[in-house]
Every structure is written in structure tokens, then in C-alpha cells.
């Protein structure tokens, strides 16, 4: 268990260099690590529960990749939105949010048309953004211990 904890600490340190701002890069790294932990947990669960395991795994992978890109896009969007003024900032953030939602919707629609197991994997992968936010508090404590 200690070995896993030390490995996660090292990974968090390396990932925190994603962006220049120390605290923002750290938060982004914690969110991405939370997405990966979510993916590993649900991949293991899906291999036990699902009947078409490969399709579920591919859907989960697609959802996780989309989730990582969405989190990075949210960071960049908020960063740019803070630099813009007034209504221009609001419009910019709304446009980017709409694009993220449209990409998620298109991904889910394509998956459901192919196979329900693929769709379930995509949805579980996209939900990793939410669970990652919940993991963030615990990963933050782990990061502070280093």
C-alpha cells in the first residue's frame, strides 16, 4: 500500500507541471489523476459485470479521453475568460461550454448507435469528471504530504 501511495505522489508531482501556474497545474493534475483512478476502478468492475467487455473498455477509454480533454479545456477556458472583459468573457465561456457538451453528446450518440455496452462505457468515462472532483480533496491531502 505504501508503494502505491509513493507512486501516486511521484505521479502527482510530475503531472503538476502541466501548466505554468503551480496551484492551477496541481489542481489540473489532481483532476486528471482522479479521472485515471475512476477509469481503473470502473474498468475492473466492467470486466466482471459486462458481457461485451471489449466494447465497454473501448467506450470507457473514449469517455476517459474526452473527460481529460474536457478538464484541460475547462482550465484553459476559465483562464482565458478571466483575461477578457464583461460580456465578452461570459460569451466566450458559454461558447466553450456548449462545445464541450456537444462533443459529449455526439460521442454518446455515436456510441449508443453502435452498441449499448459501448454507450455505457462512454457515459461512465464522462462521469469521471464528476468523481474526479470528489477525489480532489483526498488527492490534495496526498499531495500536501510530499
Image (cartoon, helix red, strand yellow):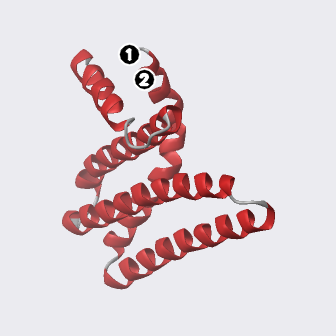
Q: Is residue 117 left or right of residue 98?
A: left
| Numbered label attached to residue 146 | 1
Residue at the image point whose x is 44% and y is 37% from the top: 30
Q: CA distance from mark 1 to mark 2?
A: 6 Å
Q: Nearer the viewer, residue 100 or 79?
A: 79
Q: Residues within 10 Å of mark 2 (few under 14, many from 20)?
A: some
Residue at the image point whose x is 25% and y is 25% from the top: 7
Residue at the image point whose x is 40% and y is 55% from the top: 68
**Vertical side of 8 occupied by 81: above or below:** below
Residue 8: percent from left, percent from top: 30, 28
**Vertical side of 75 occupied by 91: above or below:** below
Judged from this view, the residue extending furthest toward the bottom is 113
Residue 118: percent from left, percent from top: 32, 71
The reply to whether dot 1 and dot 2 touch (C-beta < 8 Å) is yes
| Numbered label attached to residue 143 | 2
For label 2, the SS is helix
Amino acid at each position: 500500500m505504501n508503494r502505491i501511495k509513493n507512486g501516486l505522489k511521484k505521479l502527482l508531482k510530475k503531472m503538476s507541471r502541466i501548466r505554468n501556474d503551480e496551484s492551477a497545474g496541481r489542481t489540473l493534475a489532481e483532476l486528471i489523476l482522479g479521472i485515471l483512478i475512476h477509469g481503473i476502478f470502473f474498468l475492473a468492475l466492467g470486466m466482471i459485470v459486462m458481457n461485451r467487455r471489449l466494447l465497454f473498455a473501448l467506450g470507457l477509454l473514449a469517455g476517459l479521453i474526452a473527460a481529460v480533454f474536457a478538464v484541460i479545456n475547462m482550465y484553459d477556458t476559465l483562464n482565458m475568460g478571466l483575461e477578457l472583459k464583461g460580456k465578452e468573457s461570459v460569451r466566450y465561456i458559454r461558447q466553450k461550454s456548449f462545445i464541450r457538451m456537444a462533443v459529449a453528446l455526439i460521442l454518446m450518440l455515436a456510441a449508443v448507435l453502435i452498441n449499448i455496452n459501448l454507450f455505457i462505457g462512454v457515459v461512465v468515462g464522462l462521469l469521471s469528471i464528476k468523481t474526479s472532483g470528489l477525489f480532489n480533496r483526498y488527492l490534495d491531502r496526498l499531495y500536501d504530504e510530499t
